[in-house]
Amino acid sequence: MSAPLFQKISATLIDVLIYTVPTTYSMRNATRPWAIPLIIVLSILMYPSFGQDYRPGYIVKNDKDSINGFVAYTAGKKSVSTCSFKATSDSPAASFSPNLLRSYGIYGDRHFVSLRLPGATSEEKVFARVLALGAIDLYSYNKDFIIGKDELILLTQPQSKKIETDSGTRMVTDKSYVAVVNQLVRDCNLRKRTLPFAEREFTAVVKEYNHCKGEEVILFNPRPLVTFNFNLFAGYVQSRMKMDLYDEVTLNPSKTVAIGIGTDISSPRIYDRLFVSLECWYVDQLYQAYSERNWNGAFERQDLVMDFSYLKIPIGFRYNFLRESATPYVRVGFFSSILIKQDIKTLTDSESAGVVTSSETTGGYDVKNPKGLWASIGYDKKIHNNIRIFGEVRYEHSEAFVGTAIQSFSTMDNLNFMLGFRFKRNEK
Amino acid sequence: MKNSFITIVSIAALLFACTEEETTSRTYPRVHTDAVNGITPAGAVFNASIIFTSVNILDHGFVWSERNELDFKNADKISLGARSGAGTFSATCDRSLQKNKKYYVRSYAVSADKIVYGELVEFVSQGGKSPIITDFYPKQATWDETVTIVGQNLSEVTARMVVRFGAYEAFIVKGGAEQILVKVPLQLNEPLSSISLTMIGETVTLDQKLQLKKPVIDAITPGGGTPGDIVSITGLYLGGSKARVYFGNKLASLVLSNDTNIQCIVPDDIPPGVIQVRIEAGSPDLSETTSFEVQ
């Protein structure tokens, strides 16, 4: 699906949500608030740059003219047959075939060179991804490898075939590539009995050989498949809870400070601006309400105090708008909670004939673990090598604490202001 | 550096912005009873706090009883007097407490137009000080007269105490921590009777005894007469329904008898002359005489 068509569909869905949801459902059903995260997601999808992933990179033309710009991050056969390049992030993209370029690459990531496949009959070139350069060079091309010492040798993916033996049918894999590699490295006595047909193992042999030859090897490692950021943050939470048991009661807003930890998981190799977020917050919220009534011939004044401590576990997605050292971002997701402590008390003053008698009761309400949806916007900035600082504003709407396992009698709207640090850690 | 400073300052500011439990206002003092502590065989310590007040507090303290419906009328009380403003208060209770018995206590505060009781708190007592009675007055009294008994560790709750003059139970008019008012029982007929108090399972007796007042004859009218005549004897402490009138050794029939006036009939078979008329107010030891001329 092309990017412009995708954006049109997103715009249409947003119109549906904004104009039809309020008239279809009542406000008490609170469907509109959970549409907000959906609108944000669709707005992200409308962002022009979302259609294709262009990353900072360069091209080197045949006349050795090197141009910096943005290169499309593509995978598979497309990356070996064409290079899509933009001089600036706003300029239109131009496609280059291997015959038009010497090489192209993405900074901090992949590097491709243009070459003729060994044994090719035509003058057509292909883009091969450079894995290592040194006394022996190593490239990958689709699922095959190209190894170069004095000349380029194509190592194709070994085929397996069935053979009949006295003891039955067996699968035999063609391991002739092992002999080829051993031949190339024989002057360093690095003969391998077995060599898996994989990038890591071939790269290790090349490193060994270049080390043996005393030559420095240049490795072009791909970006990590999975990476984790760990977050530490504190937040100011303003929460408003409504109960609807016998009468609707709006409790006074609760304002508190919460602390939490979290992690963002991403796959830079696939797409480095989208993250899966997981957090754990510790929150302690205090709600109060006051009411008056005539009851059994006396006048009652009642204070309701609800104090809840809980762990809130939001899960969601984060999208960074930029790859710069500082970037705005959005997040959406849902959360569940684990109630740690609850303290509910009702203070009643009953007045009759000038005598006021106070009483205090505890509990009296069924409680449940809140869960709901959230959406946020934030800003993230690098302050040190692997440390970033961020600020975020988050809105949450959920079932609140009062209710049973099958029915909620309360809702909660939270506005969170967060400040924190992100610590980057890579894993392959 | 700047970013870190801003972050730290922001987080520190957030820490001071948390919601705290708010005490909603009233037009009367709000009082909260806390848990009882310091429970020993010598008593217990009651604790409470005035959590809000916008008016003058004329009195505050605690009421306690073995019943869970308690107020000034049916519970013992510790009064701490007037106070201004909110704050905590406590009092040591060392009386009217029986060992291993459950009691209930409330704090209270009194303003110009309201009495406010705090929450009910219960506790099991390990005991308290024994009641003590040290004195009484007046030392001489007559039936149904009010006698004040002075002591310590007594009770405001009259139902909690039993006062006896001799073997007869007295009506307690008013209780109190240090003195109680009782009525001399009408059945009392001993000139001297002991006074005892029973409370929380303990009985204490005063060394001194109450002396019943002897009859006082002011006049016998007429001063003389014949058998069958009605004469009137006036005076004090004449004994009422317990009175007996003797003309010599003859018991006279009473027409009217109260503590200040007895009307009786001169008995028959009394020889003429001056005889002694004796009034006994319930006991031969409580008697007085006068003279009467039989014609």
Image (cartoon, rainbow, N blue to C red):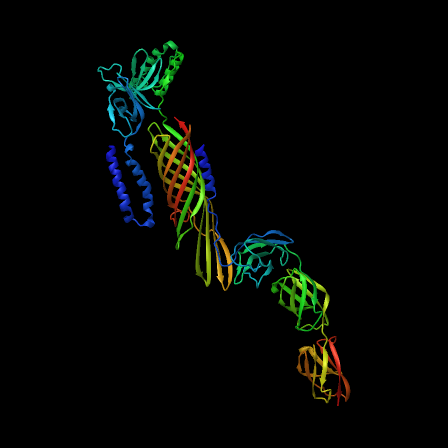
As drawn, A382 above or below B82: above
Answer with the quarter of the image where residue A99 lies.
top left
Residue at the spot x=67%, y=67% of the render? B148
As drawn, B117 above or below A197: below
Q: Going by the picture, which residue comes out furthest to the top?
A: A187
- Residue A201 visible in the shown view: yes
- Residue B100 in picture, x, y percent from top left: 61, 55
As drawn, A137 above or below B89: above
The residue lying toward the viewer, choosing from B280 and A236, is: A236
Q: Going by the picture, which residue comes out furthest to the left?
A: A122
Residue at the spot x=34%, y=11% of the render? A184
Position of the C terminus of chain A by quadrant? top left
State how many labels appear.
0
- Residue B279 in picture, x, y percent from top left: 72, 80
The residue lying toward the viewer, choosing from B52 and A33, is: B52
Q: Going by the picture, which residue comes out furthest to the right?
A: B273
* Horizontal side, residue A22 vs residue B42: left or right: left
- Residue B260 in picture, x, y percent from top left: 68, 79
Answer with the quarter of the image where residue B176 lies.
bottom right
Answer with the quarter of the image where residue B247 lies.
bottom right
Position of the N terminus of chain A by quadrant? top left
- Residue A29 in picture, x, y percent from top left: 33, 49
- Residue A283 visible in the shown view: no
The residue lying toward the viewer, choosing from B121 and A196, is: B121
The residue lying toward the viewer, choosing from A31 and A362, is: A31
